[in-house]
Amino acid sequence: MNEQLWKKAEEFIHQCHRELQKPEDETSSRLCEIKEEIEETGSYTHTYEELAHGARMAWRNSNRCIGRLFWRTLHVLDERSRDTEEAVFQALARHVTFAENGGKIRPVITIFRPSLPGKGDIRVWNHQLVRYAGYETADGIVGDPASLELTQRCEELGWRGKKTDFDYLPWVVQIGSRPPKWKEVPSGLMKEVHIVHPELEWFSELKLKWYAVPIISDMKLEIGGIHYPLAPFNGWYMGTEIGARNLADENRYHKLPEVARRMGLNIERLSDLWKDKALTELNIAVLYSFKRAGVSIVDHHTAAQQFKLFEQSEAQEERALTGDWTWLIPPMSPAATHIFHQEYENATHTPNFFYQKKPYE
Ligand code: ARG
C-alpha cells in the first residue's frame, strides 16, 4: 500500500469535506473507499466534486496570483476520459471557446487524466494554449523571444510558421512515449486585441496586438497526492502583464523605445523618465483597447483592491493567507498598492499548481 499517497488523500478529503460541510459518516465511508482503491490499484479516483473543489483550492493556494478573490468561480471541465491526441486537441479547443465566451472571460480549468502507475502521462508542450512563436533570423529575433526554444522544437516536428511577430504556435500533444503530434490552433478560435490609444492616434501604427486569454498549460495540478500533469487553466489578464512585461521587457517585445520616440521623448536621458512615461501610455493603451474590444481585463489598482478583499475573506474563514510578495506586487507603481507595504508568508500548501520538467528537454 502506498502509505504516502494514502496520507495525502486522507488530509485532502478531510479538508475538502470540512469546507463543503459534508456529514462525518460520508467522510469516513469515502475514506474507506479510497483506501481500498489505493490498495487495489495504487491510486484513487477523485469524484467530480473533489476534483472541482480541489482545483479551486489549488487556485486559492497559488501564492503568486493576485486574482485569487475569484477562486470559487472557477469552472472545472472534467476531461479525464480523453485518451487520444485528437480527443485532447478537441478538449483544448472547447476550453478556449468556453473561457473566451465572446470576450466576457470565464476562469476555467480543464483536467485531463492523472499520472497513473504503468501509464504514460498526457502532456502538451505549450506553455500557454495560445502564445506567439519566436524566431532567430538574420535581422534579429522575430516574434516573442520567450518562445524561441519551443518554436524550434515545433519546427523540428515539421511545423512551419509565417514568421510574423504574432504567429500562433501549434498545439503539441504527447501521450506517454508516443511521438508528439501537432496541430494548428483553429483560426478564429481566440480573439486578439489590436492595441490603440484613447488620445495618441499614431499608436495603432505600431501594429501591436495581444491575445485575449492567458491559458497556462505546462503546470502540474496536485490534489490529495494525485498529480494531473495536464490541467490548463486561465483567468483574465491584468493589464500590466501585457503592457509592462510582454510588450515592454527588453527580452520580450521591447517596445518602450519606439513608444517613447513616437511620443517625442529624448531616449538618451534616463533621468527624464522616458521609460516611465512610455510605460504609462502603453498600459493606458492596453486597458483601453481590451475594454473597447469587449474583452475582460483588470488594471493593477483594481486587482490589488480585489486582493485586499481576498485577504479579508480568508481571514474571515480563519485560513492563514500565503503569498509571494515578489510576484504579487504589480510591475508598475507597486508602492501605490497596499500589497507593497505588507508582508506575506510564502508557504506552499496543497492542492496547488507546480512547475514540472518540460517534456521536450
Ligand atoms: N503573465 C502571463 C502572460 O502575460 C500570464 C500568466 C497568467 N495570468 C493571468 N492573468 N491569469 O501571458
Image (cartoon, helix red, strand yellow):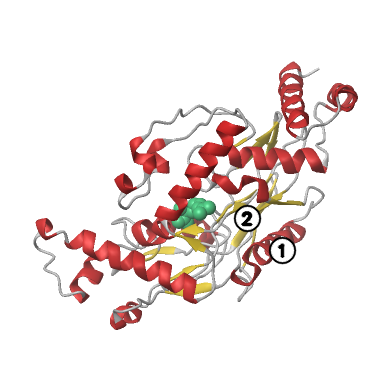
Look at label 2 and name its amino acid: Pro
Residue 4 figure quarter:
top right
Q: Mark 2 touching mark 1, by CB under 8 A?
A: no
Tell me the amino acid under the disc marked 1: Arg
10 Å neighbourhood of mark 2: few (<14), some, or many (≥20)? many
Residue at the (10%, 56%) spot, across then down? 271
Query: In screen coordinates, is 328 left or right of 101?
Result: left
Q: Residue at x 37, y 62 (%)?
A: 243
Residue pictured at 45% horizontal, 49% vertical? 305
- How far apart marks 2 and 1 lie (CA) works out to 13 Å
Percent x, y of residue 253: 34, 63
Camera-side residue: 28 or 259? 28
Q: Residue 285: in sight, yes or no?
A: yes
User: Left or right: 18 with respect to 70?
Assistant: right
The disc label shown at residue 18, or none: none
- Judging by the rendered image, the residue that carries numbered circle 1 is 94
Q: Is residue 165 visible?
A: no
Residue 339 position in % (x across, y down): 39, 40
Q: From this view, report whether residue 66 is shown above or below residue 9.
A: below
Taking 35 as reference, is 115 above or below it?
A: below
| Residue at image mark 2 | 107
Q: Position of residue 86 (x, y in %)?
A: 75, 61
Left or right, 267 with reference to 14 = left
Q: Position of residue 115 (x, y in %)?
A: 72, 37
Label 1 CA crowd tier, 10 Å (few <14, some 14–19, many 20+)? some
